[in-house]
Amino acid sequence: VLCWFYVFPVYRLPRDKDIVDEVLRQGQVWQKNQTGIDFFRKLLTKCCDPRRKFAVTKENSPMGKVLWYDGEFYHSHTVNNETFPLLVKDNPLQRPLKKCAVVGNGGILRHSKCGRDIDQADFILRCNLPPLSKEYVEDVGTRTHLVTANPSIIEKRFQNLLWSRKVFVDSMKVYGSSYIYMPAFSMKTGTDLSLRAHYALGDASSNLTMLFANPEFLLTVGKFWKARGVHARRLSTGLFLVSLALGLCEEVTAYGFWPFSVSLDEQPVSHHYYDNILPDKWYHAMPEEFVQLWNLHKSGTLRMRVGRCS
Ligand code: CDP
């Protein structure tokens, strides 16, 4: 008799506690492995070509180009008279970037004192318009070069930008003159909101530059990680940014990636460094992603900071 688990092998993720124990065993030691870094960059370039494809540009998406939404099947947007002028000319991150810091929003950052460390990087990437107010500066730093913004944030926090354009533009000032990276062509509902955010920033002569995420890039990065065992409906924003950074930067350090409720010294940790609102469990697979990132840390390809910086 064939046992059902021979027919359908079960993929078992280690328990949270096992992962925490493993991280403790490994400690904070890290040794850079240039061969590993070059190899991984090559893999990412081959699958997803971040340097040319991470944003929708006039170069890779001329008038008439059909952009297939990566988060919704059978929906597309054809680049037209309205959208074409909103695209940047060419991919703005052509030159090699030296030290990059990718900052996730994990509660592990609270009291980490990693702010100075983060601010010393040459290129700093942040997720989902995170708060950078005074109380957090010591832990998360102040500088930003690229920040992602999900259309759902525009909807919820800024009431669809129907009457809170000024509040939106003002609250973007903490990100200085960085790029704001929006998945405008992932879900149909996100397109109008992203265009509206673009107009609001443009009308106010904001210092930020809007970049629309390229759905083809998001799709290929999703497939890349799926082939490596990340079984989620959609990758988390943080993993997209780490993938982008590994494809573009000479050295990558990740902060604030810790989807567990206890810290290494067994203290409770909130989900975010600024609140404890949990994600939809079935949408992302953050612990699975963490295992992948930790493997890259162990191989010297990416440095993960999961404790205090000083
Ligand atoms: O929108 P999403 O749920 O992807 O992200 P978020 O909660 O704003 O956090 C930004 C990123 O930080 C996530 O996409 C994760 O990659 C990472 N994160 C983590 O690793 N551990 C946490 N406890 C929270 C966030």
Image: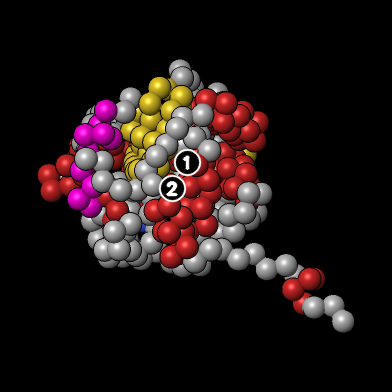
Determine which residue is flagged by label 2: 26
First to last magenta residue range: 110-120
Side of 147 relative to 228 (left or right): left
Task: State the scheme by which the image is colored.
Answer: secondary structure
Whether residue 295 is situated above or below residue 14 in the rendered picture = above
Q: Say what amino acid the circle numbered 2 marks.
A: Gln
- In the image: residue 211, left or right of residue 118: right
**Amino acid type indicated by mark 1:** His
Disc 1 Cβ-to-ligand 1 distance below 8 Å = no
Give percent across and percent down for residue 98.
Answer: 40, 22
Front tag of 1 and 2? 2
Count how many numbered circles sit on residues in the image: 2
Counting from the top left corner in percent of width and height, residue 221 is at 58, 43
Residue lying farthest bottom?
1
Question: Residue at 45% across / 32% down in the picture?
Answer: 31
The front one of 282 and 11 is 11
Q: Position of residue 99 (x, y in %)?
A: 38, 26
**Disc 2 residue crowd, few under 14, some 14–19, many 20+, Cα 10 Å:** few
Q: Is residue 97 above or below residue 197?
A: above
Q: Which residue is mark 1?
A: 297
Q: Quadrant of the C terminus?
A: top left
Which secondary structure lies at badge 1? helix
Please give the name of the residue rendered at 20% of the width and 50% of the height, measured from the top-left corner. Answer: 111
- Please identify the residue farthest to the left as the structure is shown: 134
124 within the magenta span: no
The N terminus, quarter of image: bottom right
- Category of crowding for the residue at label 1, using alpha-carbon neighbours closer than 10 angstroms: few (below 14), some (14–19), many (at least 20): many
Q: Nearer the viewer, residue 172 or 192?
A: 172
- Disc 1/disc 2 C-alpha distance (Å): 10 Å
CB-based contact (under 8 Å), mark 1 and mark 2:
yes
Question: For the residue labelled by badge 2, is the local secondary structure a helix, a strand or a loop?
Answer: helix
Give the residue furthest to the top: 95
